[in-house]
Structures are given as C-alpha cells and as structure tokens.
C-alpha cells in the first residue's frame, strides 16, 4: 500500500500572485477566478467576536457583510510561507457618510484551486471619530 500523494508546495510566484489577488478582492469585493478554492475555510477573528465560513460563496458573503462598499488597501506587506502567505493590510473605505479604516492580518494556505484556508485577524472597524480619538491620545512611532 502506498502513502497518499502529497501535493507539491505552491511556488513563490503563485503565492505572491494570490496575495495580490486577495488585495484586489479586499478593495473590490469581487474575487478573481481561482483566488478561493471552492471549499475554502475562512476563520475571521474580530475584537469581540469570531465568525467562520465554509466554501467560496460563503467566504465572499462573510467579507461583503462586514465591508459592503469598495475600499482601498493603502498599505500592505506579504510574507510567503511554505504553504501560502501572510498578508498584513490597512484598509480605508467610505460607508454611511463616514470614513472607516481597519488593520488586518491574513494567513492563507494555498492549494491547487486557490486559497484553501484563510485565517483573518481584524482590529475592528474604526470610524473617523475613533481615528481622531486615537490620534489625540497616542503618538505612534510609525504610521
């Protein structure tokens, strides 16, 4: 009896291409074909809550429920891992007449059909009042 075949590790180019496609999805709300595997598992951790989705459609719906409008990822960093990548991102968007922002960390595992596992850690969404309160209270050493 032979051992089950282990799929090859994703190439660095593939991991980085999927990370950039994830950034475009964060901005548009529309995933490109091949970004998410059909059976992707998404685990979203918020400051006081945790949500999960199984399957590409449910993962997209989870994203859209928290960020229903287009936005901009104005800063991000990608670090490849042996099985995928880690993406750190800062987003801004307009919703309900206010400017919102958040910082997020995404850990993605990549398979043959796209991202197979996605863990998302989010600071929570800050409106303009929270951003101003923070700026008045704290001097950051780096932006």
Image (tube, helix red, strand yellow):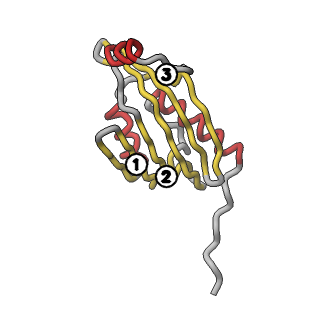
Q: Can residue 94 be seen at all in this image of the molecule?
A: no
In terms of secondary structure, where does tag 2 sit? strand
Residue 59 sits in which quadrant? top left
Of pointers 2 and 3, the one earlier in the residue sequence: 3
Identify which residue, 128 or 36, lies in the foreground: 128
Frontmost residue, 22 versus 79: 79
Seen from the viewer's position, the closer of residues 131 and 31 is: 131
Q: Residue at left 50%, top 20%?
A: 140
Q: Quadrant of residue 2?
A: bottom right
Q: Residue 138: horizontal and vertical position, in percent?
A: 43, 18
First-in-chain label (2 vs 1) = 1
Residue bearing the label numbered 2: 117
Distance from disc 2 to disc 1, alpha carbons, whole Å, reads 8 Å
In this rendering, is residue 78 above or below 75? below
Q: Can residue 126 be seen?
A: yes
The crowding category of the residue bearing disc 1, from other C-alpha atoms within 10 Å (few below 14, some 14 to 19, many at least 20), is some
Residue 44, horizontal then vertical, whole percent? 39, 44
Cα gap from disc 2 to disc 3, whole angstroms: 23 Å
Tag 2 near tag 1, CB within 8 Å: yes
Mark 3 neighbour class, 10 Å CA radius: few under 14, some 14 to 19, many 20 or more: some
Q: Which mark is residue 43?
A: 1
Residue occupying the point 71% across, 46% down: 12
- Give the residue at mark 3: 72
Spatial CA distance of label 3 from label 1 is 22 Å
Task: Determine whether label 2 and label 3 are within 8 Å by CB.
Answer: no
Q: Earlier in the sequence, mark 3 or mark 1?
A: 1
Residue 101 picture quarter: top left
């Amino acid at each position: 009896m032979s051992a089950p075949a282990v799929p090859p590790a994703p190439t660095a180019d593939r991991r980085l291409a999927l990370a950039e496609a994830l950034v475009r999805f964060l901005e548009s709300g529309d995933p490109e074909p091949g970004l998410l595997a059909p059976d992707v598992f998404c685990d979203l951790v918020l400051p006081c809550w945790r949500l999960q989705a199984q399957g590409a459609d449910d993962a997209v719906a989870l994203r859209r429920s928290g960020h229903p409008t287009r936005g901009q990822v104005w800063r991000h960093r990608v670090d490849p891992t042996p099985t995928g990548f880690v993406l750190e991102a800062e987003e801004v968007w307009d919703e309900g007449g206010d400017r919102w922002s958040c910082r997020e960390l995404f850990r993605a595992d990549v398979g043959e059909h796209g991202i197979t596992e996605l863990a998302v850690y989010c600071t929570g969404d800050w409106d303009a009042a929270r951003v101003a309160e923070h700026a008045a209270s704290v001097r950051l050493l780096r932006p």
